[in-house]
Image (cartoon, rainbow, N blue to C red):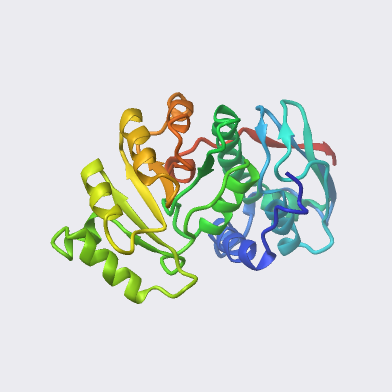
Amino acid sequence: MSLDTLFLPNLLWEPVIRTALQEDFGTGGDVTTQSLLQGRPSLKASFQARKEGIVAGLPGAELTFALLDKNVRFTALKQDGDQIHPGDTLAIVEGDASAILGGERVALNLLSHLSGIASTTGQIVRSVEGTGVSVCCTRKTLPGLRALQKYAVRAGGGSNHRHRLDDAIMLKDNHLALFGSNIPSALAAAHERAGHLMKIELEVDSLAQLEEALSCPHGADAYLLDNMTPDMLREAVKMINGRAIAEASGGITPQTARNMAETGVDVLSLGWLTHSVTALDIGLDITTA
């Protein structure tokens, strides 16, 4: 995937990066670097991949240094969405030593975290290749990082579920409880509120619930099939019969994703892609001082 199709405006990067820099610098700044530097020497350093994966977050790394010193030069040798290998140089940064050393950790934190998400997403996407299934994240994102984490999922070849509560109507078990678990009443209320462009998704955890929903005059646009076995998913897909999107969620792992995808569902949604994925090992190495 290239930056022609993968994009996140600086407007969404900058608040996160500013907050991270303020958190790191405190009120006194980088006292370690201040104590060692004489004058304003320049450095040249490179971002190096130490593990195989998919890179995401290079625009954020670049903006980190630009916010500290607009004269720092950042040269990206890879693009977000690129497959990378141990030893690959991802980018070169040159300029004021205090800006580079001061921004190093924030840039690496973002780059490693987002690349971890992209890499894991890519692993799942490859495992279900040929099934036609979309691999999707959820709203189980770390507070304040949603736009960046969902961007990283796209860098890995995945797709995004709702970004916010106002994107679509999604009826889950706690919403159904407001209607005494009466699915027809809940769906009717949702259709009354929804405009012609707003989709409705209903979460069901049994085939009986799905059958009840499908018998309604106005059903859902998508059904979230929660924690169903592969056999249940196959039956649910037959029942839906193309009338709505079939989304499988819950208990999907790298080992089970292919089996789930082959049931005929349209979407696999995985909350752990954003809330508990492992960071990709990336380092910043000084090449000249």
Using the image, determine if residue 181 lies above or below residue 136. below
- Which picture quadrant has residue 83? top right
Q: Is residue 16 left or right of residue 220?
A: right
Q: Nearer the viewer, residue 172 or 286?
A: 172
Residue 145 visible in the snapshot: no
Using the image, determine if residue 39 lies above or below residue 12. above
Which residue: 71% across, 32% down? 49
Q: Position of residue 6 (x, y in %)?
A: 70, 53
Q: Position of residue 208 (x, y in %)?
A: 21, 44
Residue 61 visible in the snapshot: yes
Which residue: 58% across, 34% down? 125
Using the image, determine if residue 7 lies above or below residue 154. below
Quarter of the image with the C terminus is top right
Quarter of the image with the N terminus is top right
Which residue: 61% across, 64% down? 12
Q: Nearer the viewer, residue 78 or 232?
A: 232
Q: Nearer the viewer, residue 149 or 65?
A: 149
- Which picture quadrant has residue 236? top left
Using the image, determine if residue 282 lies above or below residue 14. above
Q: Residue furthest left?
A: 180
Which residue: 43% across, 54% down? 139
Q: Nearer the viewer, residue 223 or 275?
A: 223
- Which picture quadrant has residue 9? bottom right
Q: Position of residue 187 (x, y in %)?
A: 28, 64
Q: Position of residue 107 (x, y in %)?
A: 66, 49
